[in-house]
C-alpha cells in the first residue's frame, strides 16, 4: 500500500524529507514558496535525482525506471502547460491521448475542464487559468493510476478552482492516487486525506487535516458580558482542563477542547447567572494557525 | 473530516470515469501521433516554411548564374538541381531540426513531453519523419523551378528517394544530437557554423573535384559530400547505384540516430 517512500538530504532545497502515500488517497504537500515542494515532486516525477536517499514511485525508481513509471503516472507541471505552444488545445490533448493505450475521450475531457469553447485556440493564446486547466486535462488523459499536480489551482478563478476540486474528488472516487502541492490551506483542508507540511525542505508536520488541527490544539471561545463574573463558579461547571480568564473588564476568553457540549455548558451557566453573552465567537485552529506555530511565519510570507 | 464522510467512496461520472487504466500506446501509434503533430507545427511556422522553401529556391537561381566559378560543364543547371536538393535536405534535417528542437528544450516544451509515456526514440523518429514529409514539399518545389530553368530530369527517382531518406536520417540524427545535448544559444551558433562548413567543404556548393585530391579523399566521408555526390551521380551522370555514398550515409545514420535517442536530454 505504500506507493512512495523517500528519504534524502544533502541538498539545500530538500533536506532529509520522508513521506509516503497510500494508494487511492489524496496527499497534499503544503508549504510556502521555496519550501521544496516542487523539487520534491520533480524527484518523484523522475526529472531530478536525489543527492541522497531513496525514492520509490509505484514500487520503482522514477528516474532509473522512467520508462516503466511514466506511462502509469499523470503529471501537471508548475508554470503553464509545457508542450507545444503553437499547437491548438485540442491537438495537444489528442497528441497526449496518442501516447496512451486507453485514453479518455478527448472531447469529453476538454468539456469536463471547461475548455470546449477554446479547443481550437493555440496554447500560447490561452489565459493562465485556461492553461492550468489544459495542463490538468493533459495529466489525466492517459487514465493514470497516480497523478502529481504541482499547484493545480494557481491562477484559476474561484469557479474554475471549485471545478478542479470537484474533479480531484472524482479522481479519488475512481481510485486514482493524487499527490498535489499547494500553498492554499483551504485546498489542503478540502481535498487531502493526508497533509504533509513542508518548510525549508523538511517535514514539519504530517497527518490528516483533522489530526493536524486537533493535535495539541486549544480551541477558544470569546465573549463579552458584564465585568466581574465569578469565574471560579464557571470553571467548576466546565470540563477539566478548560481555562477561563477575563483579559479586559467584560471580555472573557475560554480555552480548551471546544466541543458543542462545552458551548452548551457555557451558555447554560450564563443563563443561570442572568448574564447575556454578547459577541460570542468560537475559534478552532486552522491549518494556518498550525503552520504559524510550527514555523513562526505565515504561508504567504 | 476524520473519516472523510463528505467524499463518497466512488462516484458515477457524468462524462466518463477516471478509473485508472494506464499504459503506453503501441510505438507505431505514438510515432504516427508525434509525426503528425510535428509536421503540422512545421507547416504552421511561417519563418520555418520561408527558410526551408524560399532559401533553396533563391540559391537555385544564384548558383545557376555562372558568376562564381566555372564548373566546366555544358549545362550548369544539371549540377545545380541535385546540389540544391542536397542543400534542402541538410538545411531542414540538420539546421532546422537542431535549432527548432533546441529552443523547444529551452522553453520546457520537451520537459512536458518527457513526463509522458513517449520514449526518446519515438520523439527522435517523429521529428525526423516530419522533416522527411517537409522535404517532399521542398523537392517538388525545387523540381518545378528547375524545370522552369530548363533542367532535364534524369536518373532513377527511386535512388534519389533512397538517398534523400538516408540523408535525412543522418542529418536529422546529427541535428537532434546537437539539440538534445547543448544549450539553445550554443546550438544556434553550432548549427549555422556546421551548415556553412558542410555547404562549402562538403561538396554541395563546390564539387569535391575542385579540391586537391588528398583533401577530397577525406571530405568525401562527410554526410553532405556523400549525399551531394550520390545525388549528382544519379541525377547528373546517370551512373547507377552509388554504393559508396549510400554506405557512408548509412553509417552516419546508424551512429547519429541512436546516439541522439540515447543522449537526448528533455530539459
Image (cartoon, coloured by chain):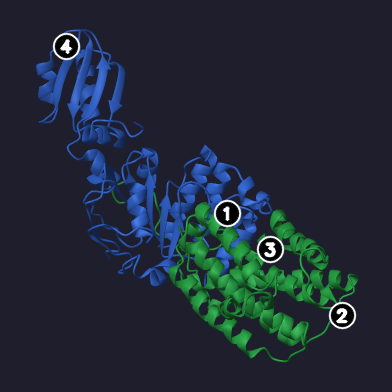
Chain colours: A blue, B green
The front one of A117 and A100 is A100
Mark 4, mark 3: which one is toward the viewer? 3
CA gap, disc 3 and disc 1: 26 Å
| Residue B266 image point, x, y percent | 46, 61
Is label 3 or label 2 in front? 2
- The Cα atoms of the two marked residues, 4 and 1, are separated by 58 Å
Residue A106 lies, in percent from the top left, at 60, 62
Picture disc at residue A112? 1
Crowd band around label 2 with a 10 angstrom C-alpha radius: few (<14), some (14–19), many (20+): some
Identify the residue at horizontal 26%, vertical 46% (top origin): A12
Relative horizontal placement of residue B58, taking residue B267 as reference (left or right):
right
Classed neighbour count for the residue bearing mark 1: other residues with Cα under 10 Å, few (<14), some (14–19), many (≥20): some
Residue hosting label 2: B152
Pointer 4 residue:
A229
Q: Which dot, 2 or 1, sits closer to the camera?
A: 2
Q: Quadrant of the C terminus of chain B?
A: bottom left
Q: Are marks 4 and 3 on the same chain?
A: no
Q: Tell which tag, 2 or 4, sits nearer the viewer.
A: 2
Q: Quadrant of residue B210?
A: bottom right
The tag on residue B40 is 3
Category of crowding for the residue at label 3, using alpha-carbon neighbours closer than 10 angstroms: few (below 14), some (14–19), many (at least 20): some
**Left or right of B63 on screen, residue A35:** left
- Secondary structure at badge 1 equals helix
The residue tagged with tag 4: helix, strand or loop? loop
The answer to whether residue B254 is seen in the rendering is: yes
Residue at mark 2 to residue at mark 1: CA–CA distance: 59 Å
Amino acid at each position: 500500500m505504500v506507493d512512495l517512500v523517500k528519504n534524502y538530504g544533502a541538498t539545500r532545497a530538500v533536506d532529509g524529507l520522508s513521506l509516503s502515500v497510500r494508494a487511492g488517497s489524496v496527499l497534499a504537500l503544503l508549504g510556502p514558496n521555496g519550501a521544496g515542494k516542487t523539487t520534491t515532486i520533480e524527484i518523484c516525477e523522475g526529472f531530478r535525482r536525489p543527492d541522497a536517499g531513496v525514492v520509490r514511485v509505484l514500487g520503482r525508481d522514477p528516474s532509473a525506471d522512467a520508462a516503466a513509471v511514466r506511462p502509469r503516472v499523470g503529471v501537471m507541471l508548475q508554470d503553464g502547460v509545457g508542450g507545444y505552444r503553437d499547437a491548438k488545445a485540442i491537438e495537444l490533448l489528442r497528441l497526449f491521448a496518442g501516447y496512451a493505450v486507453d485514453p479518455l475521450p478527448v472531447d469529453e475531457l476538454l468539456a469536463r475542464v471547461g475548455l470546449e469553447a477554446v479547443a481550437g485556440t493555440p496554447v500560447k493564446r490561452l489565459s493562465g487559468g485556461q492553461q492550468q486547466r489544459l495542463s490538468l486535462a493533459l495529466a489525466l488523459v492517459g487514465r493514470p493510476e497516480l497523478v502529481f499536480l504541482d499547484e493545480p489551482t494557481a491562477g484559476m478563478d474561484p469557479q474554475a478552482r471549485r471545478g478542479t476540486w470537484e474533479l480531484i474528488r472524482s479522481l479519488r472516487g475512481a481510485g486514482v492516487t493524487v499527490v498535489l502541492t499547494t500553498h492554499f490551506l483551504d485546498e489542503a483542508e478540502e481535498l487531502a486525506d493526508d497533509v504533509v507540511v513542508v518548510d525549508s525542505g523538511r517535514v514539519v508536520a504530517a497527518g490528516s487535516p483533522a489530526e493536524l488541527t486537533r493535535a495539541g490544539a486549544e480551541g477558544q471561545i470569546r465573549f463579552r458580558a458584564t465585568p466581574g463574573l465569578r469565574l471560579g463558579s464557571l470553571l467548576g461547571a466546565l470540563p477539566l482542563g478548560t481555562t477561563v480568564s477575563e483579559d479586559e473588564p467584560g471580555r472573557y476568553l475560554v480555552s480548551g477542547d471546544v466541543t458543542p457540549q462545552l458551548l452548551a455548558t457555557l451558555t447554560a451557566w450564563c443563563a443561570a447567572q442572568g448574564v447575556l453573552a454578547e459577541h460570542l465567537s468560537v475559534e478552532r485552529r486552522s491549518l494556518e494557525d498550525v503552520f504559524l506555530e510550527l514555523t513562526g511565519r505565515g504561508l504567504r510570507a | 473530516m476524520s473519516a472523510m464522510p463528505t467524499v463518497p467512496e466512488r462516484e458515477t461520472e457524468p462524462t466518463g470515469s477516471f478509473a485508472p487504466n494506464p499504459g503506453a500506446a503501441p510505438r507505431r501509434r505514438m510515432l504516427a501521433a508525434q509525426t503528425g503533430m510535428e509536421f503540422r507545427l512545421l507547416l504552421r511556422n511561417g519563418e520555418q516554411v520561408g527558410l526551408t522553401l524560399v532559401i533553396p529556391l533563391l540559391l537555385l537561381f544564384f548558383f545557376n548564374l555562372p558568376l562564381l566559378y566555372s564548373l566546366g560543364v555544358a549545362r550548369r543547371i544539371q549540377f545545380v538541381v541535385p546540389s540544391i536538393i542536397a542543400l534542402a535536405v541538410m538545411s531542414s534535417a540538420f539546421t532546422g531540426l537542431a535549432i527548432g528542437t533546441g529552443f523547444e528544450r529551452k522553453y520546457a516544451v520537451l520537459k512536458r513531453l518527457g513526463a509522458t509515456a513517449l520514449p526518446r526514440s519515438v520523439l527522435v523518429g517523429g521529428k525526423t519523419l516530419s522533416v522527411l514529409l517537409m522535404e517532399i514539399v521542398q523537392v517538388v518545389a525545387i523540381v518545378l523551378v528547375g524545370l522552369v530553368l530548363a533542367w532535364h530530369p534524369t536518373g532513377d527517382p527511386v535512388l534519389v528517394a533512397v538517398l534523400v531518406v538516408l540523408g535525412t536520417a543522418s542529418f536529422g540524427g546529427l541535428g537532434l544530437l546537437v539539440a538534445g545535448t547543448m544549450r539553445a544559444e550554443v546550438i544556434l551558433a553550432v548549427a549555422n557554423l556546421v551548415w556553412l562548413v558542410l555547404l562549402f567543404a562538403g561538396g554541395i556548393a563546390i564539387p569535391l573535384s575542385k579540391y586537391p585530391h588528398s583533401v577530397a579523399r577525406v571530405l568525401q566521408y562527410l554526410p553532405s559530400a556523400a549525399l551531394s555526390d550520390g545525388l549528382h551521380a544519379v541525377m547528373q551522370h546517370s551512373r547507377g547505384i552509388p554504393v559508396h555514398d549510400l554506405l557512408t550515409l548509412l553509417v552516419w545514420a546508424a551512429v547519429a540516430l541512436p546516439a541522439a535517442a540515447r543522449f537526448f536530454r528533455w530539459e
